[in-house]
Amino acid sequence: MATTTDPTTEWKTIRSKRKPRRSNRTSPSQRQPTSEPSSSSLDSLPMSERLSSLQKDCARYETIWNESATRRDVLSLAARIASDLTSSSSSSSSSAKGKRVRVGLCLGLGSLEGERGGWEGRRRAWMQLFAFEGLVRGLDSGAKKGRLRTVLQDPVFTEGDRMFLSGRGHEVLEDPGGFEVLRRVEGGMDKKEEEGEGEAKAEKEEEEEEEEEDGTLLFGVHLYLPVYKRALESGLPAVFVGTGWDTWDDINRGDELPALKEIHETYRREEFPEEESLSTFSSTCVYWKGPDSRQDAGEDEARGGKSQVECPETDGEREKRSEKTPIGEHVKATI
């Protein structure tokens, strides 16, 4: 008989800690508010008031995001990935079909208004939302079927979160809706259904469709291992943003993520842009299916080298390899 797990427990996120910079003053954006909204206090407020508060928070945090170097780096990264995916699709030398990102799936974002994680948790959620939307916009430029479909799933979402995110054009699904979207897109199920319904499509359009496969952007920052495992077993995305495989391997849990190991060895990868002095995207890598990336990876390994670009270590990791990392401590606590 299968064991039932508490979805809220499974979706707890992990945070890689950094030594804070010494400073006698706290910046305005990092000052803790005098009060924290609780679940009971949120439920007692009219939804119109909650949505108004979310809009104000959005405007405030979006100003911070728009002025940050992280935003510029994320948009630049999205442009490079889009270019690689386009090259992969048009390359006649590639034996594998190219992939176009059709769906952006964000897992475990966190609540934008809830009390879990306090004001720091809400700030991280806002920054990660803007990063996800920035990647989607960058990848959307190469979409042939219009705007990319965006899907978000997290059991901690409040009703206010769901209404606000829906108002921004996102679909908000309950578990296991997000995993099912990934499974259907990467398994080609949606495309087959579309072809069945549109038998009258022009022959030329059908030939063009055969040159590419639909793919997903899977975005999940600082999730626990079981969530990554479950998501990646649903299908390998065209683009993946999350904790790098080498981070799990450093704490002897890499073998539990064979799908992520395959991505790590065959996709292109970079360190995800970080916020200065903050851990919003620490230990996070981005992997994507570039032109002939599988072939290039095999050639690199045959020469005794490593495939593609290494995901750099975070601050202090080199000096503390023999010690327990914050990620290791959190993960072991869930075993």
Image (cartoon, rainbow, N blue to C red):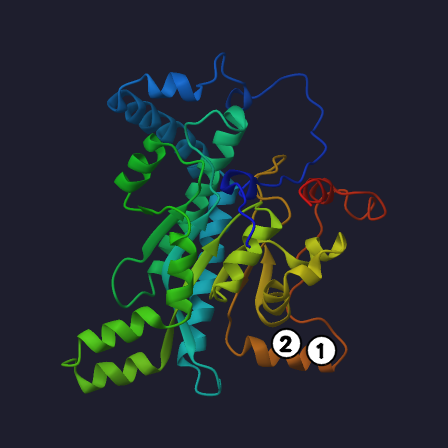
Q: Nearer the viewer, residue 53 or 234?
A: 234
Task: Name the image quarter holding the N terminus.
Answer: bottom right
The quadrant the C terminus occupies is top right
Expressed as whole percent of the image width and height from the top left, the position of residue 302 reads 72, 82
Number of marks in the image?
2
- Horizontal relation, residue 39 to residue 200: left or right: right
Of all residues, the one furthest to the top in this rendering is 34
Write down the residue under mark 2.
Answer: 297
Q: Is residue 113 above or below residue 302?
A: above
Q: Is residue 223 above or below residue 270?
A: above
Residue visible at 55% across and 54% down in the picture: 2
At 37% from the left and 46% from the top, the residue drawn is 174
The local secondary structure at tag 2 comes to helix
Q: Quadrant of residue 274?
A: top right
Amino acid at circle 1: Glu
Check disc 2 and give the amino acid type.
Ala
Instruction: Categorize mark 2 by other alpha carbons within 10 Å: few (<14), some (14-19), many (20+).
Output: some
Residue labelled with disc 1? 301
State the image coordinates of residue 318 (x, y, percent, origin top left).
80, 48
Q: Position of residue 214 (x, y in %)?
A: 37, 70
